[in-house]
Amino acid sequence: TMAGRLPRMFGARYYDLFYGKKSLLSLTAPVHAGLALEIRMAEPGDLEEITRRQEGYSSALFDQYTTLGSDCYVAHHGGKLQGFLWINRQSMQFLGMKLPQLPLGHCFVHSVFVFPAARRKGVFQFLFRTVCDELSKDGYQSICCLIDRMNFASIQAFGNEGTRFRLAPILKLPGIRPILFYWTLS
């Protein structure tokens, strides 16, 4: 409709999202992936492999993520990359835009991806729980995320890990910081 196209013509964007939050204060049950996985911080070769295998990812994007303070964790099986996720311990971010600072003891997960051949084998669960356990040991109390409301697979995967959701639309107008429509991050 013209009413929807007109704001986009002037650079306005509306994102229909969920804000999800999971407590890291209680222990999670161990999960056994269908593959023997090694979870570790990404190395330069891992990031190169991601850009080679995944459309839409680039070294410029990864530079932007690291500039905003994010770290990449990867899951490997037999020397082959199976999936990855990014963690930020300082602020939330969305589409490369820095969002509010996180309260002390809270962190943000973004840009999660499991390669198609590794799906339905527990890779996300093992990667996410391993990272959550590490964060918990480091004193973090919760982890949060932003997920498109139409991304049913991600909503279910995070929901199965104890993440609770609420509506969190974002409006991005040209020249100003994104406007978040939810009350608090804590």
Image (tube, rainbow, N blue to C red):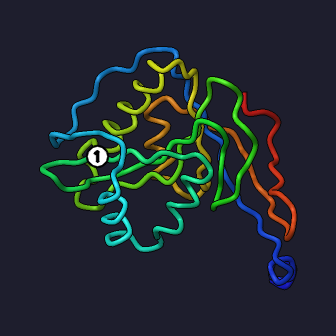
Q: Is residue 42 above or below residue 58?
A: above
Disc 1 crowd, CA 10 A, few/some/many (<14, 14-19, 20+): many
Image location (x, y in percent) of residue 17: 67, 52
Residue placed at 76% from the left, 43% from the top?
100
Residue ID for mark 1:
75
Q: Quadrant of the N terminus?
A: bottom right
Q: Quadrant of the C terminus?
A: top right
Residue placed at 51% from the left, 42% from the top?
87
Residue 68 is left or right of residue 133, and the answer is right
Image location (x, y in percent) of residue 6: 86, 82
Residue placed at 47% from the left, 26% from the top?
135
Residue 47 is left or right of residue 104, and the answer is left
Q: Of residues 142 and 19, which is closer to you in this image?
A: 142
Q: Is residue 171 above or below residue 78?
A: below
Image location (x, y in percent) of residue 46: 31, 57
Looking at the image, how many numbered discs can be counted on the residues? 1
